[in-house]
Amino acid sequence: MPTSPKATVLDHRKVAAARVFAASRYPYLASALFAAQVHPAQGSGTIGVDQGWQVHADPNVLDAMAVDDVGRLLVHLVSHLLRDHATRAERAGVGGTDSDPHAWNRASDAEVNDDLALSAMVPPCAADMPAGLGAKDGRLAEQYYELARSGHRQWDCGSGCDGIDRPWDDSAASGRLNDRDGEFLRLGVASELQRAEGREPGTVAAGWLRWAERVLPSRVDWRRVLAAEVQAGLVHVAGMVDYSYRRPSRRSESSPSVIMPTLVRPIPDVAIVCDTSGSMTGDLLGRVLAEVEGLLQRVGLRGTNVRVLTCDAQVHSVKRVSRAAQIELLGGGGTDMGEGILQALALRPRPSIVVVLTDGFTPWPIEAPRVAKVIVGLIEGGGGMAPWVHRVPAPPSWAKVVRISELDADG
Ligand SMILES: [Zn+2]
């Protein structure tokens, strides 16, 4: 069907307020909540989500719902996507003969809702709980599915829940995420969620923590770990502004009960500091850097937002480069990555994330920089390391360390 202009009578202010409400309850879900754009779906009779993280809302249904309940529903809908219910539905045979997509909707609702219930965030419109299906909390949709077959679905959560396309799904919708972007978003949220729990144990519901453990890669796969760290850093940068409702937009003056978020986002800048001291081999560093740059591109950072500094005891060159091959390894003396970090932070615009690629034979600043997140890519197995050298100064506890250990994979 050719796309025709839809009647746009969607209450975008309500959506914005609902999203802020949701993100204030679950800051670690913020990136997912803000990725899920809301489009009008006149006559659909529901508010559901598709597999590209886009929400399709019947304007009339939206109008009938309170702001807080829209916020609850947004959390619920992105939960389907974070938990990849559409893919899991396909694996469970949903959509095939003798399957029951409505039962899958209820079963996956139950999987999502028991965690939301702990903070009174279950959406009233899609409120199925495990107990209602005669099951215990804390199980997965696959386990609830058979039980849910007797009964009717309350709510259509969309193709993002059961993997079956809806008439209002729009593969050309602006803001639509492809599978890979969706996967990076999952990684970023999982990492952010574990960090929130680390800062304050008990913050995150047990079901979410189990989910994050399943999603996050083992330490071995450094590419995915580093991608998750960078993604979480970007979330943080975006979040700093998304939450700046201290500076309300002028439109909110007309309705003082609704807090409007400011919608300006900074473009995150990343600086990469490369250790070019004698203990590093250029070939190894070049390969790591090439992979890191590719990875940054995949999380949506274009070359112009990535600057590369080469550094040993002093910073030798600060360059914006478009390819790893353009890096000259100028160092060779002692090493001080603290100097490299300082120089990176002196760049304008100032980077919000600094990635340090080093073998770790370096002193570090004692305190964390307040203005940027530092991720240390600790390159192991460079060949130049004598086996008795174990007194490598540990990277500082304030930095996020990703061990880069295996390089022969195709990347
Ligand atoms: Zn649902």
Image: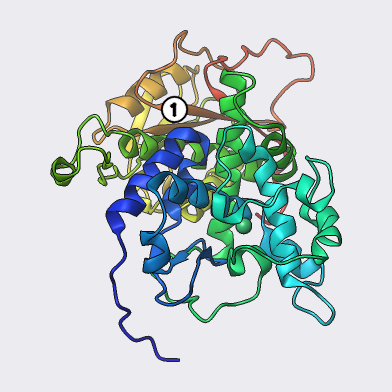
Element type where label 1 sits in the image? strand
- Can residue 249 be seen? yes
Where residue 85 appears, x then y in whole percent? Answer: 69, 59
Classify mark 1: residues with Cα within 10 Å, few (<14), some (14-19) or many (20+): many
Which residue is depicted at the point 49% across and 20% down? Answer: 333
Position of residue 147 in the picture relative to residue 192 (left or right)? right
Looking at the image, the residue that sits furthest to the bottom is 1
Q: Nearer the viewer, residue 268 or 286?
A: 268
Number of marks in picture: 1
User: In this rendering, is residue 374 above or below 99?
Assistant: above
The CB of the residue at mark 1 lies under 8 Å from ligand 1:
no
User: In this rendering, is residue 345 above or below 226?
Assistant: above
Which residue is depicted at the point 59% across and 34% down? Answer: 193
Position of residue 66 in the picture relative to residue 26 (left or right)? left
Q: Quadrant of ligand 1?
A: bottom right
Locate residue 125: give its quadrant: bottom right
- Can residue 227 be seen? no
- Say which quadrant the C terminus sits in: bottom right
User: In this rendering, is residue 361 above or below 233?
Assistant: above
| Residue type for callout 1 | Lys
Where residue 387 appears, x then y in whole percent? Answer: 79, 19
Which residue is depicted at the point 57% across and 66% down? Answer: 51
Which residue is depicted at the point 37% across and 52% down? Answer: 303
Position of residue 168 in the picture relative to residue 4 (left or right)? right
Where residue 267 appears, x then y in whole percent? Answer: 31, 45
Locate residue 279: give its quadrant: top right
Where residue 198 appears, x then y in whole percent? Answer: 61, 21
Q: Nearer the viewer, residue 144 or 198?
A: 144
Q: Which residue is mark 1?
A: 373
